[in-house]
Image (cartoon, grey):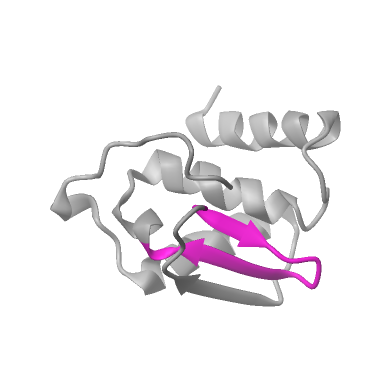
Amino acid sequence: MSKSTAHERAPLEETVPADVLKSEVLAWARRIGVTPKEIHIRPMKRKWASCSSSGRLTFSTDLMRQPAEFRAEAIVHELLHLKVPNHGPLFRVLLRAYLAERKGD
């Protein structure tokens, strides 16, 4: 997921530790029905997150300073790549559906 979209930084009190981010990833993985092989958090210059074809998810440390709603978007986006490897129509429909479920739409 590219960092091309500028987002405001969350206030310091909204910053989450790495273990909380990993817990959010695992909770979403259960909801989506996928099992990431590895979850890593490290500095990334150009992306919020990435997913390898082997099932390794990497999230930017900058994501820990983003609002919960944006973190969820990045997390769901990458986890869905474990089911759908591209950004085609099925991917976009699933992404909207899972994020709408979160918001209660």
Task: Check residue 23 for magenta coloring.
Answer: no
Residue 72's place in the image compared with 90, above or below, is below
- Residue 3 image offset from top left, x and y in percent: 47, 44
The residue lying at 51 percent from left, 63 percent from top is 59
| Residue 82: quadrant of the picture | bottom right
Q: Is residue 66 left or right of residue 92?
A: left
The residue lying at 33 percent from left, 48 percent from top is 66
Residue 60's place in the image compared with 80, above or below, is below
Residue bounds of the magenta highlight: 47-61
- Residue 26 image offset from top left, x and y in percent: 57, 65
The residue lying at 83 percent from left, 33 percent from top is 88
Q: Is residue 54 left or right of residue 49?
A: right
The residue lying at 35 percent from left, 36 percent from top is 7
Q: Nearer the viewer, residue 68 or 104?
A: 68
Q: Nearer the viewer, residue 92 or 42?
A: 42
Q: Is residue 75 left or right of residue 93?
A: left
Residue 19's place in the image compared with 83, above or below, is below
Q: Is residue 3 visible?
A: yes
Question: Farthest top residue?
Answer: 105
Quadrant including the C terminus: top right
Question: Farthest front residue?
Answer: 45
- Residue 42 image offset from top left, x and y in percent: 45, 72
Q: Is residue 23 visible?
A: no
